[in-house]
Image (cartoon, helix red, strand yellow):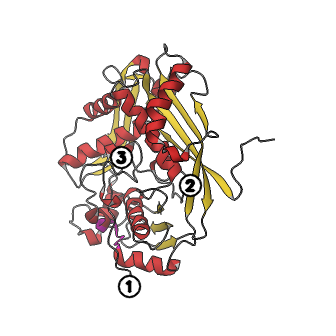
Amino acid sequence: MTDIKPPQPGCFLFTSESVNEGHPDKLADQVSDAVLDACLKQDPDSMVACETCTKTGMVMVFGEITTKAQVDYEAIVRQACKDIGYDSEDKGLNYATMEVLNKLEEQSPDIGQGVHGMGTRKSAEELGAGDQGHMFGYASDETPELMPLTHSLATQLGKRLTDVRKDGTVPWVRPDGKTQVTCEYKKGDDGSMQPQRVHTILISTQHSPDVSLDQQKKDLMEHVIKPIVPEKYLDDETIFHINPSGRFVIGGPHGDAGLTGRKIIIDTYGGWGAHGGGAFSGKDTSKVDRSAAYAARWAAKSLVASGLAKRCLVQVSYAIGVVQPLSMFVDSYGSGVKDDETLCEIVKRNFDFRPGCIQRDLNLKAPQFQPLAAYGHFGREDLKPAWEIVKDLKHEL
């Protein structure tokens, strides 16, 4: 029999997780986007598909890049690992002594011709999608940044863990770590999601070998949980799990292999809404896996911020080399002040989902992606990317 503390009558439990920038998969995402940014800084038209993998004492970058930029890829990889804090084998990786393998090649001319018209100059309105696929954007009015509370809290706890490590407030914390938050929700009659309380908080963080579990619990409650989780959501019944495995000294790539694109739910909405399956990091924004997901979030957030829905999901789909999207769908979960078909028409009239137009309207050829590769691509009030800036919608049809 499964024994879980039940929610209040009429409520349900939902959980989201996050990982710190030192998690091996997130290290890989950040390296891939560091390579992308380095190319875009010199050549905004760079075509990049950079994957990264890592294990003990090694980081490898591989994939396809076409660029006029002159990039020292090894230096970029080492700097990204240094910025995370991997400066000792004891922590799981040493940026100075690790092996860096470069297996990057040039992009297939077949793909380049179909998408970019290699050798010809296409306008933004003429660029085809870099691949097929379907992408989603989501927004909910339960937080000021219009993100799900479970995801927001899990992500902020992870970011706080990194902050107190880097500024020395909690010196025993090491780069690798994970967080998870379960909240109790009630669904409003208007279709909204209404958080009632935090049910469970879980933090597993890599630590130095000389700190006791009691000290870990004390420091993380005082310096991580209390500054992040609003007091109104905590009560005597909230459950806390701090390093429940008891010991987490071996971490980073020494503890687990890491690979780009394995934390796509953490990158987006923490399990809310939907996901088309495509990862973001290491891809220039001719790849609609990335650019269209940003545009869909822009549209969903703008609908909710405009008061047209309490929460909503936007889906768009593409075919490789084809300029116009194949389909579009909006689901307001019954929270819309207009029906979903009308909301979809509002999106179509206010947003141009042609791939080149997304790049243009959201300034996606500018280097800006490495900071997004940890702690989420959406709801980033600290970075304020263009897709988080609400658009003033014309919604009189």
Q: Amino acid at mark 3?
A: Leu
Image: 295 above or below 178:
below
Residue where numbered disc 1 is placed: 396
Residue 353 falls within the magenta-colored stretch: yes
- Which of the numbered marks, if any, corresponds to residue 229? none
Quadrant of the drawing holding the N terminus = top right
Secondary structure type for disc 3: helix
Q: Amino acid at mark 1?
A: Glu
Number of labels in the image equals 3
Residue where numbered disc 2 is placed: 195
Secondary structure type for disc 1: loop
Q: Residue at x 39, y 60 (%)?
A: 288
Between discs 1 and 2, the one toward the N terminus: 2
Q: Amino acid at mark 2?
A: Pro
Q: Residue at x 51, y 25 (%)?
A: 218
Q: Point out the stretch of residues depicted in magenta.
A: 351-357
Q: Residue at x 29, y 68 (%)?
A: 357
Q: Quadrant of residue 117?
A: bottom left
Q: Viewer-nearest of labels 2 and 3?
A: 2
Q: Residue furthest top?
A: 210
Which is nearer the eye, 140 or 118?
A: 140
Which is nearer the eye, 195 or 202?
A: 195
